[in-house]
Image (cartoon, rainbow, N blue to C red):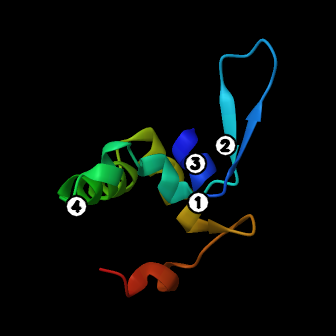
Amino acid sequence: MAAALLEGLVAIIIDNTPFALIVPVVFGQFLQAPEDYYESFDFIRTFRWLALLAATAAPNSPLGQKVEITLSVMNGQPLQDTTFGTMQ
């Protein structure tokens, strides 16, 4: 939490709660670890992003199925086959 405060973020602390909320947050911050601040080797951070991509792209994973459904339906109507016909 100290690093977030030094970066200019705000911490919300509530009585009788063991948690603190840090706001505002960007999705990429969920994939950061404390080691990213003092390690110069960037492979682990890249590996985290690739693992997220693999997990969401896997058609058998629950998250992958949701992403596939989300991409195939727009405004409550299925997209035409010609939309994804060029993507091979």
As drawn, the label of residue 4 is 3
Mark 4 / mark 1, whichever is N-terminal: 4
Q: How many marks?
A: 4
As measured in the structure, the alpha-carbon distance from the residue carrying label 2 to the one carrying label 1 is 29 Å
Q: What is the secondary structure assignment of the residue under circle 1?
A: helix
Question: Which part of the image, by quadrant, shows the N terminus?
Answer: top right
- Picture quadrant of residue 78: bottom right
Horizontal side of residue 83 vs 79, given as left or right: left
Mark 2 / mark 4, whichever is N-terminal: 2
As drawn, the label of residue 33 is none
As measured in the structure, the alpha-carbon distance from the residue carrying label 3 to the one carrying label 2 is 7 Å
What's under tag 2, amino acid-wise? Ile
Q: What is the secondary structure assignment of the residue under circle 3?
A: helix
Q: Contact, CB < 8 Å: mark 4 with mark 1?
A: no
Mark 4 / mark 3, whichever is N-terminal: 3
Q: Position of residue 18 (x, y in %)?
A: 66, 17
Q: Where is residue 48 in the image (x, y as percent from the top left)?
A: 30, 51
Mark nearest the camera among 4 and 1 is 4
What's under tag 3, amino acid-wise? Ala
As drawn, the label of residue 42 is 4
What's under tag 1, amino acid-wise? Thr
Q: What is the secondary structure assignment of the residue under circle 2?
A: strand
- Picture quadrant of residue 45: bottom left
Q: Where is residue 82 in the image (x, y as percent from the top left)?
A: 49, 85
Q: What is the secondary structure assignment of the residue under circle 4?
A: loop
Residue occupying the far top of the picture: 16
